[in-house]
Image: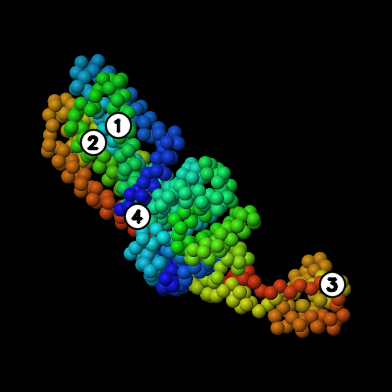
Amino acid sequence: MKTNRILAILYRHLVLWRRDFDKIAETFWWPIVDLIVWGFVTIYLQKQTGATAEAVSFFLGGVIFWSVINKSQLDVGMTFLQEAWDRNLINVFASPITKWEFLTATLLLGLIKVILSVIAVGLLAIFLYAFNIFKLGWYFIPFMINLLVMGWWIGIFINGIIIRYGYRVQAFAWTLIFAFQPISAVFYPVSVLPPFLQIVARLTPASYTFEGMRAVLISGTFSLELLLLGSLLNLIYLVLSLLFYSRMFNAAQKHGYLIQFS
Amino acid sequence: MDNVVEVKNLTKRFGKFTAVSNISFTIKEGEIVGFLGQNGAGKTTTINMLLGLLTPTKGTVRILGHDLSKERSKVLEQMNFSSSYVKMPWRLTVWENLFTYALLYNVKNPKQRIAQLLKIFEIEDLKDKQAGFLSAGQTTRVALSKAFINNPRLVLLDEPTASLDPDIAEKVRDFLKKIQKEEKVTMLFTSHNMAEVEDVCDRVIFIQNGKIIAQDTPAGLAKRIKTSKVRFMMIDGMKRTIEYCKEYKYPYQEDGRYITISVKEHKIAEFINNLAKKGISYSEITIDKPSLEDYFLSQTYENK
């Protein structure tokens, strides 16, 4: 793994990110819009139900944490697609860069944007709604890592699918993630789901993270069990996604799918 | 090192279709080899296999002494390519694009190297312009700068002078010949400009239907065509000349007062003598020796 090649991809995409309003909007605009909408929902629920601020604050926590998964997965697929849209894939993959170095660059790119996005949205939540996500303290870090890793493996799977099936499935890069939202317990506990969906939710690492976050925010208790179960599932899916990506990339080299993008 | 490229029994099949069929060739250090063939002959598939973008169905590629399938990154660090059909990120400036590739290829002193290349290809004034706003010729020159950013030992050039003005195209050819001579850079070169191939290439590999059908010097391939084109500006006897051509089955082309006739080289003297005997008079005569283009065309027609 050579850092210069990873830096090359990071440099090229960060220059583009700085220059394109679309890309800046992806990082800041949608998370901020979500925050504002859910912030007002929180205020409304407080007034209607008389619940304490803590009891409904998980909506805002959910919005901020969901943006971590969404942003981290988005960059894995979008970085590859951006090279394809620019008809630059051949230049990139005819260079010494390996598929793993390229993937690492896309993961880091997602990480950079997630950090920027969470800082912006987190600060705005304090300013607008007096909700401080950082009051989770040290628990904030393992929750963040788990969500980041889940975003990564989803992104890696999607990237593999795009490499194999091309432009006809490119919309997966920004839509497939929403299939995970209902089963991730972002805004409600797993127990409200129908029994068969509860099973599916239990196989989704994010459900453990969001339930764990809610427990800390509402009752101040931290469940190590939830964290470990989520982490274990993440690890399994991450390994599977990497195997899938490698297999799809090799198939693309065998059948010429990479060249077809250009 | 003697052979920079060693291709052995290379084959690529896509389902039942065979794009490249069992080809073998070598390229020596410092050699410029033209890789010619009609569209769909298998040139691009071969180049994609040499770049590691496509896995061969069968056969081996050794570049700079390394097996490409096993040491891909090590090989690609020392080579590069340019194609007028591959674009660069259009929202990045020329300098930003070249800097990205300098990082990818781990170029020492990238800023200095970029400045050198911008000067060589006369695009210094374009360095802050976004790639998407360049003309076709300017894009080609940026692609060439990218192809030489890492001082490669092997360069694959796909139509390197496409879209260039003639004066710039000549400068590019001079640059290629210069680095071949001074730095012993090896090049595989595709072009539809046969005069350019004759000018630049030491040797030509001709591929058709996925198979190599000839390997020779440009002059050697041209010599395989035994027919010359004899062109007359007629004063008197155009009708009789045409009748004579028809009678003895000489292909001809009439153009006002001019007539161009294809004649086997060993029969030119006899042909001219016979015209004289018929009292045909002309004021000008030119004899065009067969060129690489004639060879290319003859193979194209044979294939049809």
Q: Disc 2, disc 3: CB below 8 Å? A: no
User: Looking at the picture, does residue A184 appear above or below residue B280?
Assistant: above
Q: Are marks 1 and 2 on the same chain?
A: yes
Q: Secondary structure at mark 2?
A: helix
* Residue at left offset 52%, top offset 55%: B144
Which chain is mark 4 on? A
Q: How many C-alpha atoms fall within 10 Å of the one at disc 4: few (<14), some, or many (≥20)? A: some
Q: Nearer the viewer, residue B14 or A241?
A: A241
Q: Disc 1, disc 4: CB below 8 Å? A: no
Three-letter amino acid code at the position of disc 3: Ser
Q: Secondary structure at mark 4?
A: loop
Estimate the spatial distance between the alpha carbons at disc 4 and disc 2, rounded to whole Å. Answer: 28 Å
Residue ID for mark 4: A98
Residue ID for mark 2: A144
- Earlier-in-chain disc, 4 versus 2: 4
Q: Which mark is residue A118?
A: 1
Left-right relation of B86 to A54: right
* Residue at left offset 30%, top offset 55%: A246
Three-letter amino acid code at the position of disc 1: Val
Q: Are marks 4 and 3 on the same chain?
A: no
Residue ID for mark 3: B283
Q: Secondary structure at mark 3?
A: strand
Q: Nearer the viewer, residue A250 or B205?
A: B205
Q: How many C-alpha atoms fall within 10 Å of the one at disc 2: few (<14), some, or many (≥20)? A: some
* Residue at left offset 55%, top offset 70%: B202
Q: Secondary structure at mark 1?
A: helix
Q: Position of residue A206 (x, y in %)?
A: 22, 38
Q: Disc 1, disc 2: CB below 8 Å? A: yes
Estimate the spatial distance between the alpha carbons at disc 1 and disc 3, rounded to whole Å. Answer: 86 Å
Q: Are marks 1 and 4 on the same chain?
A: yes
